[in-house]
Image (cartoon, coloured by chain):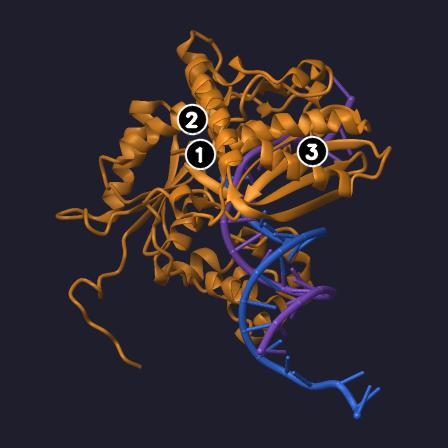
Chain colours: A orange, B purple, C blue
DNA sequence: TCTGGGGTCCTAGGACCC
DNA sequence: TCTGGGGTCCTAGGACCC
């Protein structure tokens, strides 16, 4: 084995994972207290939930007391009420979440510029270059304390030498804690845990491992690597490595352009009228292409998704003859896809559209042929976009949209970005 | 008043080419 | 005439994350 020793290369990486405790609920609590509320919803059985009248009644976040009743994220509000009849339900507010996420990010920037915003409430920090005269653990405690005192909510901080272990560490006991998970601690702290606790090991895989008599992360770590590869392919290798605490991935602190952009909506009532579906598809397409153009990107693939009344998902996609961000062109393709897959009369619960295989606008190869027509269409998009930019997304409304009030959930706003930056 | 929405990545099978 | 096999691209569907 050859070991390359280049200056600095032999240093182990110093990684922190910062995870907001019950983010949506905590941020709501802080906001309520700021507005003079007498109760702290972190201290009572409470959840952040969707809207049941819009058929999106699920639990998005829960308080520790709610958790004690056995309520879990993703289950229906109906189920939550069965478990805890007195449960308090508060609505989602993505604008508030994004503000708080940004506050956290700003504070963390004082410690390192190598921050990966993994989700709205999670960050990885590469501290390798910023520990002069201090330890990683000290920094973790400092961050934990400062977030609490300056921002009013609590975070767990995971301390380790790679991202996977830092993330696993931050998931240990909660809330408001700092945990380490160094190599020598893997056997005692991580191996006794059930496989379900391992990152990237989901509900479909757990029973398969169980059938192989693998119940803990330790048992997975000691399973023959080749066997796992044979059984699960690439995922098998990754899971074996994770179970053994191996992860060489870098903190992705540079802004990355999206690989795909999509919007979907669960309809307030099932729809079996193709004309109506087309209208909704147009609204979704306008939202998606608007976002696409804001990134200065072009799409090569258009995808349409349908979910029937009985929760059967179907999707169709097609590669475009050339990359574009043009609303009219993309909608025309989406409409074809919808017609190809829609069986007349089927009640539809959800419709979605997305664009994939994105490229930067300036990457596009210039066509040898004239593109006058496209240029004209792009101009129209440009004008519409600048109005939307100035006066809000709905300053320009397609006529068709007006008749959708009873069907479309909250068509008054562009769906908030899930991931910041 | 039962089951969200936004992503990334992988796999399997078919078409097509050499 | 008796039908291999590798590579690439495309599409549908699914697993998993927050």
Rounded to the nearest whole Å, what is the CA distance between mark 1 and mark 3?
A: 25 Å
Give the mark, 1 or 3, whose residue is nearer the N terminus.
1
Which residue was labeled with disc 2? A98
Give the mark, 2 or 3, whose residue is nearer the N terminus.
2
Task: Note whether A364 is above or below A83 in the view shown.
Answer: below
Quarter where residue A411 is shown: top right
Q: Position of residue A134 (x, y in %)?
A: 17, 46
Task: Please state if A196 lies on the left or on the right of A367 as rendered.
Answer: right
Q: Which residue corresponds to the image point at 31% horizontal and 50% vertical from the top-left?
A: A15
The chain under label 1 reads A
Q: Which residue corresponds to the image point at 67% horizontal and 30% vertical from the top-left?
A: A281
Q: Which mark is residue A54?
A: none
Tags 2 and 3 touching, CB below 8 Å: no
Tally of numbered discs: 3
- Nearer the observer, A125 or A258: A258
Q: Are marks 1 and 2 on the same chain?
A: yes
The chain under label 3 reads A
Tags 1 and 2 touching, CB below 8 Å: yes
Q: Which mark is residue A120?
A: 1
Q: Which residue corresponds to the image point at 47% horizontal and 18% vertical from the top-left?
A: A388
Q: Position of residue A135 (x, y in %)?
A: 21, 48
Task: Note whether A184 is above or below A34 in the view shown.
Answer: below
Task: Note whether A310 is above or below C4 in the view shown.
Answer: above
Badge 1 element: loop
Rounded to the nearest whole Å, what is the CA distance between mark 2 and mark 3?
A: 26 Å
Which residue was labeled with disc 3? A351
The chain under label 2 reads A
Badge 3 element: strand
Q: Position of residue A377 (x, y in %)?
A: 52, 30
């Amino acid at each position: 084995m050859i070991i390359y020793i280049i200056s600095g290369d032999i240093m182990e990486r110093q990684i922190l994972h910062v995870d907001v405790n019950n983010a949506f609920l905590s941020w709501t609590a802080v906001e309520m207290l700021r507005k003079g509320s007498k109760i702290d919803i972190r201290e009572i059985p409470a959840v952040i939930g969707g809207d049941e009248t819009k058929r999106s009644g699920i639990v998005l976040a829960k308080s520790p007391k709610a958790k004690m009743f056995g309520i879990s994220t993703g289950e229906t509000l109906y189920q939550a009420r069965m478990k805890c009849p007195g449960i308090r339900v508060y609505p989602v507010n993505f604008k508030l979440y994004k503000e708080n996420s940004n506050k956290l990010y700003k504070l963390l920037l004082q410690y390192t510029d190598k921050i990966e915003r993994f989700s709205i409430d999670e960050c990885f920090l590469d501290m390798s270059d910023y520990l002069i005269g201090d330890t990683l653990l000290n920094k973790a405690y400092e961050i934990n304390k400062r977030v609490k005192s300056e921002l009013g909510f609590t975070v767990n901080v995971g301390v380790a030498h790679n991202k996977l272990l830092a993330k696993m560490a931050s998931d240990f006991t909660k809330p408001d804690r700092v945990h380490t998970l160094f190599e020598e601690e893997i056997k005692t702290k991580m191996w006794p845990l059930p496989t379900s606790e391992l990152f990237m090991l989901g509900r479909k895989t757990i029973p398969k491992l169980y059938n192989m008599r693998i119940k803990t992360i330790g048992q997975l770590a000691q399973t023959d690597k080749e066997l796992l590869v044979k059984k699960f392919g690439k995922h098998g290798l990754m899971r074996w490595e994770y179970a053994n605490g191996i992860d060489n991935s870098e903190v992705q602190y540079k802004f990355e352009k999206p690989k795909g952009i999509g919007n979907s909506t669960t309809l307030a009532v099932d729809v079996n009228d193709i004309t109506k579906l087309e209208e909704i598809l147009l609204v979704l397409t306008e939202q998606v292409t608007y976002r696409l153009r804001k990134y200065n990107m072009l799409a090569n693939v258009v995808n349409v998704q349908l979910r029937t009344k009985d929760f059967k998902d179907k999707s169709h996609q097609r590669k475009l003859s050339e990359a574009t961000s043009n609303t009219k062109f993309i909608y025309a393709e989406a409409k074809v896809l919808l017609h190809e897959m829609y069986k007349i009369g089927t009640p539809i619960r959800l419709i979605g559209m997305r664009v994939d295989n994105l490229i930067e606008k300036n990457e596009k190869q210039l066509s040898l042929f004239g593109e006058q027509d496209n240029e004209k269409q792009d101009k129209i998009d440009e004008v519409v976009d600048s109005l939307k930019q100035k006066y809000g997304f709905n300053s320009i409304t397609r006529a068709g949209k007006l008749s959708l009030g009873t069907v479309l959930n909250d068509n008054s706003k562009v769906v908030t970005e899930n991931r910041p930056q």
